[in-house]
Image: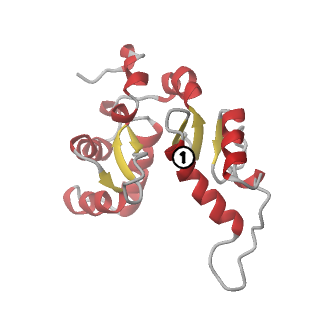
Amino acid sequence: MKTFEEATEFVLKHKVVTVFGSKGSPHPSLWDNTDLSADKPKTGGWSPRVSAVWDWKTRIPETFPDEIFYGKLPNGDAVLMEREYLRTTHYPQAFKPVSELPLLCQQIYECVRIEPWTTTALRKHAVAEFNTTKSRFDTALKKLQSSLNIARSMDPQCDGDTWIPFSEANLDIVEAYPELQADP
């Protein structure tokens, strides 16, 4: 594939597509199936493949938020997922209440629950307020994504990765599984 349209169809066809690929993953990746050069231009910058995949991982779910979800699998792989698969298969299998996650995850979630945060601002806040490291913060953020407690805002007006509660963007999915909601 070479175009945004082909990449979108690829995601819809395969239901779950990793962004950059992962050894042993049962899912196809945008990276491995993109027929663009991976060579950096002589003038510098990203290769055509890196540029395209990076653009598609953000633009596809922003353009089609009712059809495609961006998130993380429990192994940490970034994925684009067809929303009906998210609703019927992935959410009931992957969701974990925030109360079952480590304390740092709970603290970060509480920040996001109150208001949206960019990754950079949230990391800086967490390091200062929760006496953590960048590495521990990054791990906690991945756990919150893969457990379906937070999601990246699909508002194209947001700068960078801006985090909101998963339920804010996907209330219909959360409400379909009241038995999974252990938190009061």
At horizontal 35% and vertical 36% (from top left) the residue drawn is 101
At horizontal 73% and vertical 43% (from top left) the residue drawn is 28
Vertical order, 77 against 82 (above or below):
below
Q: Is residue 183 left or right of residue 24?
A: left
Circle 1 residues within 10 Å: few <14, some 14–19, many ≥20:
some
**Residue farthest bottom in this picture:** 43
The colouring scheme, among rainbow, by chain, secondary structure or one colour, is: secondary structure
Quadrant of residue 175 within the rendered picture? top left
Vertical order, 122 against 25 (above or below):
below
- Kindly state the secondary structure of the residue where label 1 is placed: loop
Judging by the rendered image, the residue that carries numbered circle 1 is: 76
Q: Is residue 59 left or right of residue 112?
A: right
Vertical order, 96 against 181 (above or below):
below
Amino acid tagged 1: Gly
At horizontal 73% and vertical 46% (from top left) the residue drawn is 6
Residue 102: percent from the left, percent from the top? 33, 41
Which one is in front, 181 or 157?
157
Residue 64: percent from the left, percent from the top? 54, 39
Q: Is residue 177 left or right of residue 43?
A: left
At horizontal 63% and vertical 50% (from top left) the residue drawn is 19
Residue 112: percent from the left, percent from the top? 28, 45
Which one is in front, 173 or 178?
173
Quadrant of residue 122 within the rendered picture? bottom left
Quadrant of residue 97 within the rendered picture? top left
Which one is in front, 97 or 153?
153
